[in-house]
Amino acid sequence: MHRAVEWGLPKFLGILGGTPEHWVQYGHAYRTAWAQAGHPAERADIAVAVHGFVAESGTQARSTYLEYEHRMVAESSAEPGRPAPSRADGAEAYGPDGMVFVGSPDEIADRILHLYGLLGHTRQILQMDVGGMPRRDFLRAIELRAARPPTWIGLSSS
């Protein structure tokens, strides 16, 4: 992180687990180092990438995503000979305290807004095509997400 700050580069958080509150410490550390380096505060740029999925309803999103995420995790666990976690283990990360953003468009908006309120990030990436999910499913998710322009949460569309 310190080299990125020294060179005036953004911070990119690729998040696979934990809680929103856990990841705030990385944003604070980056912004503190940024200020100590003498960079203008408004140029501190943090991007966040999480796994997730959008469907018409939260129930549908969780059911669809859990199927493909579980397949992906089971296959990657089998390679080194580890047992696959249960479906219930994965589902825990889908709730408001988790970092897998799965739900209806409004639920996803709420999750992003909550994280934004804690972290103040400037970019949000939602990685949806996991575990062999059919293209039609994640393209529909993109359509649902795109139906609400980026200004709905006050972040830029860049």
Image: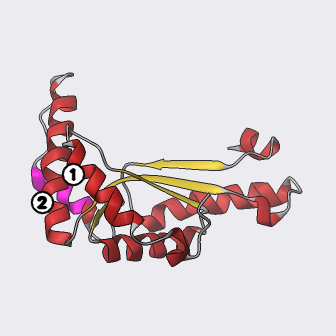
Q: Residue at x 78, y 59 (%)?
A: 43
Q: Quadrant of the C terminus?
A: bottom right
Upstream in sequence: badge 1 or badge 2: 2
Mark 1: give few (<14), some (14-19) or many (20+) Cα within 10 Å.
Answer: some
Is residue 137 covered in magenta?
Answer: no
| In the rendered image, the vertical position of residue 60 relative to residue 65, given as above or below | below
Label 2 sits on residue: 63
Q: Residue at x 14, y 70 (%)?
A: 59
Q: Do the CB atoms of the residues marked 1 and 2 lie less than 8 Å apart?
A: no
Which portion, as a residue range, is magenta?
A: 87-93
Circle 2: element type: helix
The amino acid beneath tag 1 is Asp
Circle 1: element type: helix
Name the colouring of the figure: secondary structure
Q: Position of residue 120 (x, y in %)?
A: 60, 69
> Is residue 1 shown left or right of residue 100?
right
Query: Which numbered tag is attached to residue 137?
Result: 1
Q: Name the front one of labels 1 and 2.
A: 1
Mark 2: give few (<14), some (14-19) or many (20+) Cα within 10 Å.
Answer: some
Q: Is residue 36 something one can see in this rendering?
A: yes
Q: Quadrant of residue 145?
A: bottom left
